[in-house]
Amino acid sequence: LYIIFKSNTGFIIFPPTTEVAVDDSNLFGTQTKTTADTIANSLREEILRGELEVSQGLRQDKIARKYGVSPIPVREALFQLAEEGLVAFFPNRGAFVSPLSATELFEIYAMRTALELLALEHAIPNLTEASLARAESLIAQMDSEKDICNWGELNWEFHATLYQPADMPRLMRTLRRLHVNVIRYMVSNVLDPDEIEYSSHNQSEHRQILAACRRRDVEIASILLRRHLDISSKVLVHFLEDKKG
């Protein structure tokens, strides 16, 4: 038996006993455990990098031949990616790379804002010097990173480093999936990395948030984080609508 959920982008279908392993620290899911995980990790990176295009069909038999496996792990891999929002199933048509939309992007950032503010509020009192030093190191790495997917992973690790002390694993798993989807919009809509998430302005916001965290100033850190996410969402929506126009 399979559980079927209907969404705006299609149907998500997965077995009732399926559990998706999520690596909270890495967007590409490099902690491989099974054949299905290996395939999911590979397909995920292809989707994030735009190598598998939006709305492109994902034929299970073709993928199975590519990896030299039976259709079963391929189906499990696609279920994983469907739960992450990267793949959509349509009745009698199969699996496709999920479409992009301004409506979805708004929802992603609305969820990010609510959850990240909650995480930050609970994390700041528990931040250690080691965590703060790691966050600062990640900002420095972002300064020189020119690959947009790698930059997106570093961006996740920066935010995750600040939120982990909140000790909210379910919240972190949700945030990880939201960050994965944001990378798709970055890759799809940004031709020049200097125009958006790599910008000095964005990095300046990261440094301001980190400085407020060092001072244990929950109120100011929350204000800065809300503004940071609001600006990022508006820029991405602008690029998405401009590209469609």
Image: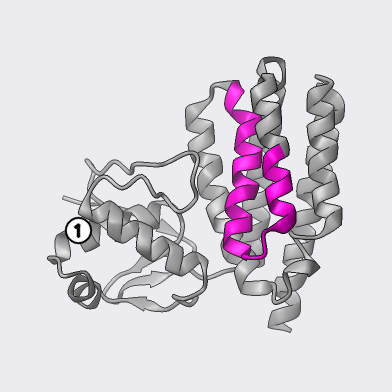
Rendered residue at 29%/70% (across/down): 91
Judging depth in this view, the residue of 170 and 63 nearest the camera is 63
Percent x, y of residue 148: 63, 64
Q: Mark 1 points at which residue?
A: 73
- From the image, which quarter does the C terminus lie in? bottom right
Residue 108 position within the rendered picture, expressed as x and y whole percent measured from the top left? 62, 51
Q: Nearer the viewer, residue 243 or 208?
A: 208
Q: Magenta segment, which residues?
A: 137-165
Q: Is residue 12 left or right of residue 145?
A: left
Of residues 150 and 120, the one nearer the viewer is 150
Counting other residues with Cα less than 10 Å from the Cα at mark 1, is it few (<14), some (14-19), or many (20 or more)? some
Residue 228 in percent (x, y) is at 80, 46
Residue 88 seen by the camera = yes
Q: Which residue is drawn at 36% across and 63% down?
A: 42
User: Dot 1: what SS?
Assistant: helix
Which quadrant of the structure image shows residue 200? Answer: bottom right
**Colour option used:** one colour
